Amino acid sequence: MILTDFDYVRPAGLDEALTLLSGTRGARLLAGGQTLLPALRTGEIVLDPAGGPLLVDIRHVDELRGIEDGPGGGLRIGALTTLAELAAHPRVLAGAPELAAAARANGDPQVRNLGTVGGNLAATGRATDLPVAAVAADALVELAGPGGRSTVPAEEFAATGAPAGSVVTALLAPAGGPAAAFEKTADRATRYPVCATAVRITSGGPRIAVTGATPRALRLRGVEDRLGGGPYTTDAVLAAFRAEPRELFVPGRGTSAEYLGHLAGVLTARALARAVQAVA
């Protein structure tokens, strides 16, 4: 399908981008383009002709790039950081390995070289890899909008998305050390997760999040409470998942809720074993 006509603007900075977004109904951000451009070609996303179809290209807004020190000794990961950069960065590998693993599992090298942290977090309509790792890491999503800058927990952002006229500027991830991991079963055709899990083991117990099998990236506090401080054996993890309500898991693509609940348990058991081994 050929794209319909639209206007294109490349703002020099974030403030200009925010002005364009707030002043044009239905304007869309263009960053990596790995979700937006295919969706425009297939008609999954239609630019609003009444508002004046507009793509706002923020790929050259340098203030949205880079990985640097964040609050409390954590990491501030700019929204335009590519997934390839995130997957290979030494500080991310050391302090937030679940984020690096989720980025590495995303698509193929071409997708990772263009796809961005902000775009992966903000993707709607299908599960992506990075949000579940951000939830397990207890990360915050930093936003900029007409009212200024704000942060929201990654789990809340997965449910609500970015408010109209706002831009994801960064992911703020607490540094947690090597005791974290990510596991995924992917759809063979699209590489999107059928089910993906991310874990981070803390002094208070594990943080566990699931996506693909659930309506969105969710932290499973019931499973966390049942596992407590361990040991995180496969049998214990599967029992903790069997106690979760089946309606939590959303069947699709020929899979049942029962199957997805079991798959989420298996992947979580693997992730916990890897996280424990990383600090053994």
Image (spheres, rainbow, N blue to C red):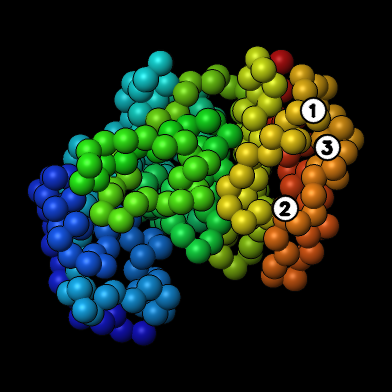
* Element at label 3: helix
Classed neighbour count for the residue bearing mark 2: other residues with Cα under 10 Å, few (<14), some (14–19), many (≥20): some
Residue 279 point in image, percent of width and height: 66, 17
Q: Amino acid at mark 1?
A: Leu
Quarter of the image where the N terminus is located? bottom left
According to the picture, the residue beneath numbered tag 3 turns out to be 240
Front position among marks 1 and 2:
2
- Does residue 69 appear to the left or right of 223 in the view shown? left
**Disc with the residue nearer the chain's start (1 vs 2):** 1
Whole-number angstrom distance, CA of label 3 to CA of label 2: 14 Å
Q: Is residue 70 above or below residue 21?
A: above
- The residue at the far bottom in this view is 1
- Does residue 222 appear to the left or right of 155 in the view shown? right
- Does residue 251 appear to the left or right of 171 in the view shown? right
Q: Amino acid at mark 2?
A: Leu
Residue 49 point in image, percent of width and height: 23, 79
Classed neighbour count for the residue bearing mark 3: other residues with Cα under 10 Å, few (<14), some (14–19), many (≥20): some
Residue 141 point in image, percent of width and height: 40, 38
Quarter of the image where the C terminus is located? top right
Q: Are marks 1 and 2 in contact (CB under 8 Å)?
A: no
According to the picture, the residue beneath numbered tag 2 turns out to be 248
Q: Residue at x 55, y 19 (%)?
A: 177
Q: Amino acid at mark 3?
A: Ala
- The residue at the far front in this view is 147
Q: Is residue 100 visible?
A: no
Q: Nearer the viewer, residue 187 or 57?
A: 57
Q: Are marks 3 and 1 in contact (CB under 8 Å)?
A: yes
Q: Residue 86's quadrant in the figure?
A: top left
The disc placed on residue 125 is: none
Q: Is residue 19 above or below residue 142?
A: below
According to the picture, the residue beneath numbered tag 1 turns out to be 227
